[in-house]
Image: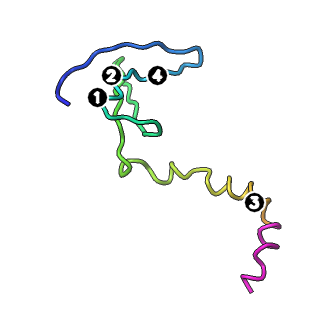
Amino acid sequence: MNQILSTSGNISSQYQVTLPKLVRDALELQAGDVVSWVVDKGKVILTPLSRKEIDPVKEMSGSASDIYKKSGGAKKIIKQNAQDWI
C-alpha cells in the first residue's frame, strides 16, 4: 500500500477505538490479528504483526496456570495420572 489514507474515529468511554473499515481493508486486518501500537512525538503508529513477530512466551503467558487451575490442582493431577507414571 503506497497511498496515504485518512479517516477518523471516536474513543469510547472505556477507551476503546474501533478501526474504521477503510483502515482494516487497507491493512487486511481481521478479528484476532495482533497489532503493535507505538507512540512517537504525539502520534500513534499502528503496525500489523505477522505470527513470526509475536513473542511466543508473551502469547502463552498464563496458559499453564490456567490449565493447572482448571484441572483442580496438583493433588488431583497426581491422583489421576499416578498409574501412568509408575
Decide: marks 4, 1 in contact (CB < 8 A)?
Answer: no
Amino acid at the residue labelled 2: Leu
Distance of label 3 from label 1 (alpha carbons):
43 Å
Picture quarter with the C terminus: bottom right
Residue depicted at x 35% and y 37%: 48
Amino acid at the residue labelled 4: Thr
Query: Callout 1: helix, strand or loop?
Result: helix
Mark linked to residue 22: 2
- The spot of residue 57 in percent (x, y) is 50, 53
For the residues carrying marks 2 and 3, which lies nearer the camera in this image?
A: 2
- The spot of residue 16 in percent (x, y) is 52, 21
Mark linked to residue 26: 1
Decide: marks 2, 3 in contact (CB < 8 A)?
Answer: no
Label 1: how many Cα within 10 Å (few below 14, some 14–19, many 20+): few
Q: Residue furthest left?
A: 2
- Residue bearing the label numbered 3: 71
Query: Callout 3: helix, strand or loop?
Result: helix
Mark linked to residue 18: 4
Q: Quadrant of residue 1?
A: top left
Mark linked to residue 45: none
- In the rendered structure, which disc, 3 or 1, sits on the residue that comes first in sequence? 1
- In the rendered structure, which disc, 3 or 4, sits on the residue that comes first in sequence? 4
Amino acid at the residue labelled 3: Ser
Distance of label 1 from label 2 (alpha carbons):
6 Å
Decide: marks 1, 2 in contact (CB < 8 A)?
Answer: yes
- Residue 4 is left or right of residue 15, and the answer is left
What residue span does the magenta drawing correspond to? 75-86
Distance of label 2 from label 3 (alpha carbons):
44 Å
Decide: is 53 above or below 81.
above
